[in-house]
Amino acid sequence: LHHPPSHCFDNSVESIKADLTEKLFSMRAKFPEVATLNDYYLALSYVVRDRVLHRWIHSAHTYFQQASRTVVYLSAEYLMGPQLGNNILNLGIRKQVEQAVAEMGLSLEDLLEQEEEPGLGNGGLGRLAACYLDSLATLQIPAFGYGIRYEFGIFDQQIKDGWQVEVTDRWLRLGNPWEVPHPERRYEVRFGGHTEAGYDAQGRYRVRWVPERSVMGTPFDTPVLGYGVGNAIILRLWQAEARESFDFQAFNLGNYYKAVDDKVMSENITKVLYPNDEPEAGRRLRLEQQYFFVACSLADMLRIFFQRDTDLDRLPDKFVVQLNDTHPAVAVAEMMRLLIDDNGLEWDRAWKITTGVFAYTNHTLLPEALETWNVDLFGKVLPRHLEIIYEINHRFLMEVNRFFPGDAGRLSRMSLFSEAGEKRVRMANLACVGSRAINGVAALHTDLLKQTVLKDFHELWPEKFSNKTNGVTPRRFMALANPGLADLITQSIGATWLRDMDRLKGLEPFARDNAFRDQWAEVKHQCKVRLAAMIRKKTGMAVDPDTLFDIQVKRIHEYKRQHLNVLNIITHYRRLKQGLDMDAPARTFIFGGKAAPGYVLAKLMIRLITGVADVVNHDPDINGRIKVVFYPDFNVKNAQHIYPAADLSEQISTAGKEASGTGNMKFALNGALTIGTLDGANVEICQAVGPENFFLFGLTADQVAATRQAGYRPCDVYDGNEELRAAMGMISGGLFSGGDPGMFAPLIDSLLNEDRFMVLADYAAYVQCQEQVGRAFLKPDHWHAMSILNVARMGMFSSDRSIAEYCRDIWHVEPVPVVVPD
Ligand code: 26M
């Protein structure tokens, strides 16, 4: 192997300027007088991309030479966020780029604003995958991220007459400068058909899969830089393409339009991202998406393996494959198929390899969210895989029976197939059986997994289970999103904290330093001014940066309880109208988040927020003491402006329902205080920052379960609380729906009749806790001291810590430093 081309990049202002002009010509065919802002954004991106690719080439070369164990991260979602700013940060060339574009009469901020982010994920799970790539690169771990290149990512959200309207996300419209397509490296993926069993020439039993159709998967690579190191890794996303050019044969057979139809059908596979929090409508295309990207990714992994090795028994020494939830769990069956059918291995040998390679992360406890597939559908799409899963199940249940003889209930609970009603494949069970490690994403979540949804698996294999509390990257969510705060921190404790977040502890003494507290307050204020300007631009609303910014941004869901937040706002509004609570600080309540398009109650919750905003914001009696804002189209890009501006972070899910939460970490790392339940990672955040610096309220997970057991009756809570009755009465009376009393009836009815998420049970405690928040905010010195202590003690929520734990406990991988000549 030759050394990679050692092209040298000069990062001086002069050469960045020269390169920018050159890219404007070579990539956009423009000269400065006719170039648009977007042309300049693209040109600058290409200038930066060259420098990124330089690191990637050296990393690939180093990883190839060392051939140490590599992490393969399989995820159906990646929410990468805008790339330009992050790459400039990680290359360490911000100052030069800023000056270069300024000398050309442009502003870097305007150019960064041009970028449309790839919204290839729904929320927490997809963003976690992106944070983990950032940390893998920074910790110098050889790794690939594999996923799907959706042509349309998560929909863009508009608010029309207070309702959510979904608009197609055409993120590729203006071109994507960050990806490098590799059409020369495509794989065929087969679907449907049937299998034929028989014996080969050596008399061995073999199964042949005769597929009905196939599509090609083409990889698009996006490099991901580490921070402060030469390492880069790649995110490889697969796009579906028709197998042949569409005029083959069919034209001669006179079946031209059928052939074109087939092409269109093939390419539909990677057309659109599905919402993950919408009851599954048995979507065949979604199963096809999952298998499509899994098949391409494993084929690619084996190709890389065979470049250097021939003995498949060594596969687990060279690769570990992490399943990000069950979306890629069909990989367990595909690996068995590859080993047995394509490589001629015996079952037992194949199974040993397979279970030596995979590890599985669970991300939810909600029973309705556990993925299952109708067996008939599964068999139609993947007949060979269904057979393999039957065989895995047969052998697995024999093993269960050896450990727990005659325990029929256990056998049926652990089976890879559920037989109640229609027969379905249980993907979580498949993932557990096929993996050598299983983890939850926060301490409480892992405990609950062991006690509930994965109880039987934990009893069989306790040693497979561990907790890996989520983390977030401080590069994007602190340095990039909040440069003012990052600079202030660096001035006081030095610059190493961005790669070693435990150093933030050094901020603790500054909590008592008046001058520092003032600077801290000033940074927060500037962030609030900036967010206020964005709110003005987006919604036309004026909000006052001197008010308490109380923010809840996340997917809209009943279990996240945005309606609990609203009930408190209405209660506070009513008190003010009655002349009560007049000493409470003025507050701006900010909401953001998307509802799954088919989730009627979630969309109604958005309408309730905008309805309350309409009334409260325009009530002259209130005179600005409450403002309510729904910030449309919450995404990674605007999140970077929202987290830094928060005084208060709302983390109010029903205890036991939010697996971890990661927004909670992004807020606290930017100096927001949290009001929250003991749910997900809140438990660990509260513990880390100290309960005296955290606004805790509500039932615990145990109390939620016990209350439910005891026969929870929400109407009793309702009957016993006058303010709650009044608040709900204002909703059902039509005050927030232009006089229409029917609009919110489904929401009110579900609270009064079932209240699955115990909104009413936690209402009084929440309102009371919010009063405490108000009083605390009136003592700014103490508030800012708490804020500083939060940041100082949040170091463990860096995704670097999470990834280091995965490396140590599950993956057993070591750093491979990359030296980049410059
Ligand atoms: C599906 C159908 C009906 C209702 C809900 C669902 C559903 C909910 C959650 C399906 C999948 C879900 O999990 C995926 C997910 O995004 N989980 C999130 O993962 C994050 C990263 O680990 C955690 O921080 C979040 O708490 C967790 O919700």
Image (cartoon, rainbow, N blue to C red):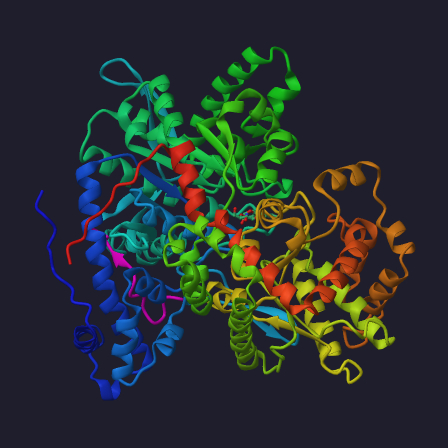
Q: Quadrant of the N terminus?
A: top left
Looking at the image, residue 474 sits to the left or right of residue 304; the answer is right
Classify 236 as above or below 71. Answer: below
Q: Position of residue 652 (x, y in %)?
A: 67, 54
In the rendered image, the quadrant that contains the C terminus is: bottom left
Residue 256 within the magenta-colored segment of the rendering: no
Residue under the image location 66 percent in, 20 percent down:
409
Location of residue 418 with respect to 718 vertically, above or below = above
Residue 633 appears anywhere in the view = no
At a point 76% along the width and 53% down the height, the residue shown is 759
The image position of residue 399, as x and y in percent, is 51, 15
Quarter of the image holding residue 632? bottom right
Residue shown at 72% from the left, 73% from the top: 585
Residue 180 on the magenta segment: yes
Residue 619: x and y in percent read 77, 82
Along the line of sight, the residue nearer the viewer: 579 or 559? 579
Q: Is residue 246 left or right of residue 701?
A: left
Report the side of 114 relative to 600 (left or right).
left
Work out which residue is located at the far bottom of the displayed protein and give it: 33
Q: Which residues are magenta?
A: 171-184
In-front residue for pair 731/395: 731
Q: Quadrant of residue 774?
A: bottom right
Q: How many marks?
A: 0
The answer to whether residue 585 is seen in the rendering is yes
Query: In the picture shown, does residue 553 fall above or below 804?
Result: below
In this view, the residue farthest toward the left is 2
Quick one: 707 or 305, which is closer to the camera? 707
User: Mainly helix, strand or loop, the magenta region?
Assistant: loop
Q: Position of residue 250 (x, y in %)?
A: 27, 53
Q: Is residue 533 left or right of residue 193?
A: right
